[in-house]
Image: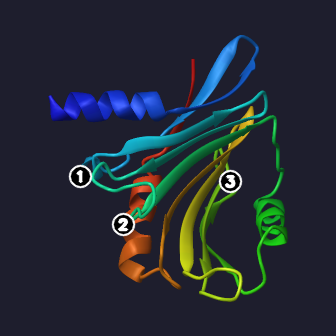
Amino acid sequence: MHKLIITIFFLWCTTQAAIGQGKVEHIVISWPGEYNWKIVKQTHDENTQTSMIIPGNDSISNPSIIGSLTVYRGAKFSKLEDIITHYKAGLDSGSRLTPLERSQNTKYSWIIFKVETPANNKYAEPESDLYYVVQGKFGLYENFVGIKAATLSDEFVKKWTAVFMTGQITTE
């Protein structure tokens, strides 16, 4: 029963992209079931759809980890370097973006990078995020996990990179 609930949750959290030629594009990621994820925020407009998730036992005011699934419909980057440039342009001073893995020569180009932000005058608590960004045919898929830490451990990066690599874009 638990596996069925997790499967339904994953399907429900599947981020949908633009409809093109009568088809709908999705990304499906197998988020670890041990967290008993719950959706705490969803937004949707004609160009963007986002779901924010936290562990089931956490409160939104103090989550141990945050997951986010976003699709930007119609967003198209021809090179992964353009994605990196786009994200670097949005960083606050003191934040550091580090590309970790990437693949340009696949059906869907993807990149994994981390953004680490120490505590500073603007942010009382540090925050670090691991991103998995995939260029789909009809949109850009941004998935990340974030924790309250100035840096991400190698163990954290390894675990969540493996989770993100379960991601598959499908078209129905």
Residue 67's label in the rendered image is none
Distance from the alpha carbon under mark 3 to that under mark 2: 24 Å
Q: Measuring 70% from the left and 56% from the top, which residue is drawn there?
A: 104
Callout 3 secondary element: loop
Q: Measuring 71% from the left and 10% from the top, which residue is drawn there?
A: 22
Point out the residue furthest to the top here. Answer: 22
Residue 112 in sight in this render: yes
In the picture of the structure, the residue carrying the numbered disc 1 is 34
Residue 105's label in the rendered image is 3
Instruction: Give residue 99's position: percent from left, percent from top.
Output: 65, 74
Task: Answer above or below: position of 147 versus 46.
Answer: below
Point out the residue furthest to the front here. Answer: 61
Instruction: Give residue 25's position: percent from left, percent from top.
Output: 63, 27
Q: Nearer the viewer, residue 75 or 61?
A: 61
Q: Amino acid at mark 1?
A: Glu
- Asked if labels 2 and 3 touch by Cβ distance under 8 angstroms, the answer is no
Q: Measuring 54% from the left and 67% from the top, which residue is drawn there?
A: 130
Q: Amino acid at mark 2?
A: Lys
Residue 30 in sight in this render: no
In the picture of the structure, the residue carrying the numbered disc 2 is 159
Instruction: Give residue 61's position: percent from left, percent from top.
Output: 45, 60
State the image quarter where residue 9 is shown. top left
Task: Answer above or below: position of 27 versus 121.
Answer: above
